[in-house]
Amino acid sequence: MLLNNKSKLCYRIELDLTFDDDSNKKATINVDDTIHISFRKNGVKLVRQGKVRNIYPSRITESKLYGTNKLSAIIELDCSKDYQKELHKIDIDDILDFLPLEVDEEDPEIIG
C-alpha cells in the first residue's frame, strides 16, 4: 500500500543558440541560476543580470512549415541587488545571448 507520493513538476530551459559567425552556445537554465542575459522586449534589446525565480510554460506555437508544435516558456528573472523586487518576464524565444554566472552564497558577489 502506498503511504506517500511526493511529486513535483520542474521546468528548465535548454538553450541552443547559433550565431551569424556559425558559433554555437548551449546551456541549461534552472530556477535559482544566476545569469547575464540579452533579450528583446517590445522590439528593444535589453541586457540584464539576475537570478531565475521561476520558469513556466506560456504558449504552444505551431510551425506550419515543419508541422510541429513547440511549447514556449517564460523566465522570471529577478534583477534587483537583493533578488527580491525587480522582476522581468522573458519569453525564451526572445533570448539573444546569455552567460551563466556563479555566485558564492556566503558573499553574493558574482564570480563569473
Image (cartoon, rainbow, N blue to C red):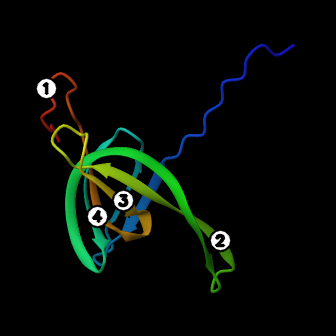
Residue 88 placed where, x, y %? Answer: 30, 57
Residue 32 placed where, x, y %? Answer: 36, 38
Where disc 4 sits, the SS reads strand
Q: Residue furthest right?
A: 1
Looking at the image, which residue is at 63% across and 77% down?
Answer: 62
Foreground of the two, 19 or 97: 97
Pointer 2 or 1: first along the chain = 2
Q: Which residue is mark 1?
A: 107
Pointer 3 or 4: first along the chain = 3
The amino acid pointed to by label 3 is Lys
Looking at the image, which residue is at 72% across and 23% down?
Answer: 5
Contact (Cβ within 8 Å) of mark 3 with mark 4 = no
- Toward which corner of the image does residue 93 lie, by quadrant? bottom left
In the rendered structure, find residue 69 and report the number of the disc placed on it: 2
Q: Residues within 10 Å of mark 2 (few under 14, many from 20)?
A: few
Looking at the image, which residue is at 65% across and 30% down?
Answer: 7
Pointer 2 or 3: first along the chain = 2
- Toward which corner of the image does residue 108 lie, by quadrant? top left
Contact (Cβ within 8 Å) of mark 4 with mark 1 = no
Q: Nearer the viewer, mark 3 or mark 4?
A: 3
Q: Nearer the viewer, mark 2 or mark 4?
A: 2
Contact (Cβ within 8 Å) of mark 2 with mark 4 = no
Does 1 sit left or right of 67 as displayed?
Answer: right
In the rendered structure, find residue 97 and report the number of the disc placed on it: 4
Q: CA distance from mark 4 to mark 1?
A: 26 Å
Residue 33 placed where, x, y %? Answer: 33, 41
Q: Nearer the viewer, mark 1 or mark 3?
A: 3
Q: Which residue is mark 3?
A: 89
